[in-house]
Image: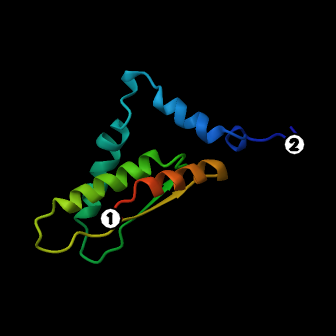
């Protein structure tokens, strides 16, 4: 199809995507992907050698829901550390092919800054 626009580049897609996630049925368990799959991996990264880079590259980040949830969990875990040494910083890099959805992710991140991330 010549001249076709991918749906994720259509005007208003970012708002549509956010509304879709906000109205998912309860069985989807929004956040379970972070709690059951991604956080255990990140928790292991927390225990990595001191000074080791802690960078998460999140592909197809969408509106940043998962990336920001990971950042929030990291910041909360750092606030609860035992105080023996400062908690490690985490860099979360979100990548997506849609400029509009990345703008939405940046706006969301500005509303929810996370210390230590």
- Residue 90 point in image, percent of width and height: 35, 65
Q: Label 2: state its secondary structure.
A: loop
As drawn, which residue projects farthest toward the right?
A: 2
Q: Quadrant of residue 85?
A: bottom left
Residue in the image at 11% along x and 73% along y: 84
Distance of label 2 from label 1 (alpha carbons): 43 Å
Mark closer to the chain start, 2 or 1: 2
- Residue 58 point in image, percent of width and height: 48, 55
Please identify the quadrant where the N terminus is shown. Answer: top right
Residues at marks 2 and 1 touching, judged by CB atoms closer than 8 Å: no
Q: Residues within 10 Å of mark 2 (few under 14, many from 20)?
A: few
Q: Residues within 10 Å of mark 1 (few under 14, many from 20)?
A: some
Location of mark 2 (residue):
3
Give left or right: position of 44 versus 108: left
Residue in the image at 47% along x and 31% along y: 22
Above or below — where is 10 with respect to 93?
Answer: above
Residue 31 can be seen in this image: yes
Give left or right: position of 102 versus 31: right
Above or below — where is 34 with respect to 42?
Answer: above
Q: Nearer the viewer, residue 106 or 58?
A: 106
Residue in the image at 28% along x and 59% along y: 75
Please identify the quadrant where the C terminus is shown. Answer: bottom left
- Residue 96 point in image, percent of width and height: 59, 52
Q: How many marks?
A: 2
Q: Label 1: state its secondary structure.
A: loop
Residue in the image at 72% along x and 41% along y: 11
Location of mark 1 (residue):
115
Above or below — where is 21 with respect to 81?
Answer: above
Q: Quadrant of residue 16?
A: top right
As drawn, which residue projects farthest toward the front?
A: 111
């Amino acid at each position: 199809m010549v001249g076709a626009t991918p749906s994720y580049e259509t005007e208003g897609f970012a708002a549509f995507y956010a509304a879709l996630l906000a109205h998912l049925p309860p069985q989807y368990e929004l956040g379970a992907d972070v709690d059951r799959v991604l956080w255990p991996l990140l928790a292991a990264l927390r225990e990595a050698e001191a000074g080791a880079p802690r960078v998460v590259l999140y592909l197809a980040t969408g509106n940043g829901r998962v990336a920001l949830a990971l950042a929030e969990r990291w910041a909360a875990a750092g606030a609860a550390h035992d105080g023996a040494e400062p908690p490690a910083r985490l860099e979360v890099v979100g990548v997506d092919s849609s400029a509009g959805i990345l703008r939405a992710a940046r706006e969301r991140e500005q509303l929810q800054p996370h210390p230590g991330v």
